[in-house]
Amino acid sequence: MKSVAEIVNQITDWQPPVIPEDIVHGDMPGDKVDITREHVQKANIIFRELLPKLAEASEKSDMGKVVITVCGGSGVGKSEIASLLAFYLKEVGIGSYTLSGDNYPHRIPVYNDAERLHIFRESALQGMVREGVFTADRFTVIHGLQEKNDDANRTHIGEYGWYEVYLRNGKEGLKRYLGSNDEIGFDEVEKIVREFKAGSDEIWLKRMGRKDTELWYEKVDFSGVQVLVIEWTHGNSDNYRGVDIPVLLNSTPRETLAHRRARKRDGATNSPFTMMVLEIEQEMLEQQASKAKIIISKRGELLSYGAYCRQMEEGR
């Protein structure tokens, strides 16, 4: 089998292939991809930038194996673009596998959502007690808002000055949980990366659906895989090691909000608490962005880290 570097060095004028309707995608149970022209245009730009970086990373790897991650915020197209990049790799003769990081939280989605909300509320109330602003009357107000799933709404500060303490402490508690080892099995993902880079022909991979009974493992054939593609919001996290080429799909806060409105999300999905989670995830992505080897804007522009920072500041 030719090495990644050998294959890349033989490519002189890469042209995008025709995209099949049944394109292979990530390994998250029930996951679907809806590839648009915008996704294809971005993937084409990224792939041309990716090729020389793949060759360089392959030459530095003991077994010639390379790990890339496609990361970004909600609705930015991680699954679609990761699927396209993996397809392009196979088309040029480089074996690839797409792993979905969404298989690796410790809890299925409904339980993890409940844990997030519990941590927010418990941290908020603990903070009020700690700062000496908690009273039974104030909790009556808070409890009423909790019943309406509206207690993460910043507009309540205008009516209740003390509410800032509730929100600030709740958000801080949530920030400690989101994307942490308490929420996600980063050790398990890092173990997979190590096994892959060591040349393992078979690796056990986790599968997680949305029900208690939808949790199992599959032994996957990696004998012909030279590039592992990890598509994941937390793909560029400091909590695990082994990624060679992080690819960041950027979307400014303003663009993300416009995207969600265009998709006509329902009230629960666009709740103040959900928006707080997305805001924290955006902050995490920004903190990790300096490590990205390729950054592309929502409009399909390649960005330097400096240009990324300016775009984020302008897009608030």
Image (cartoon, rainbow, N blue to C red):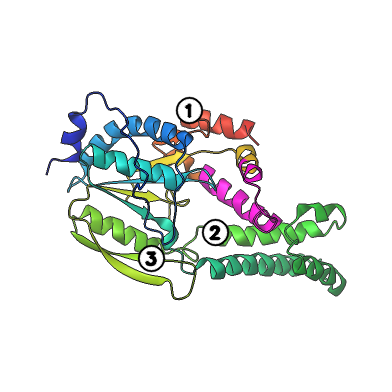
Question: Mark 2 or mark 1, which is nearer to you?
Answer: 1
* Dominant secondary structure (helix, strand or loop) of the stretch shown in magenta: helix
The picture places residue 264, in percent across and down from the top left corner, at 66, 47
Question: Is 21 situated left or right of 184 in this image?
Answer: left
Q: Which residues are magenta?
A: 259-286
Q: Secondary structure at mark 2?
A: loop
Residue at 73 percent across and 68 percent down: it is 125
Residue, disc 2: 178
Q: Is residue 134 visible?
A: no
Residue at 36 percent across and 66 percent down: it is 206
Q: Secondary structure at mark 1?
A: loop
Residue, disc 3: 207
Marks 3 and 1, Cα distance to the nearest angstrom? 34 Å
* 283 drawn magenta: yes
The picture places residue 39, in percent across and down from the top left corner, at 45, 37
Q: Which mark is residue 301?
A: 1
Three-letter code, disc 2: Leu
Q: Earlier in the sequence, mark 2 or mark 1?
A: 2
From what the image shows, is residue 189 above or below residue 64?
Answer: below
Question: Is 120 situated left or right of 230 in this image?
Answer: right
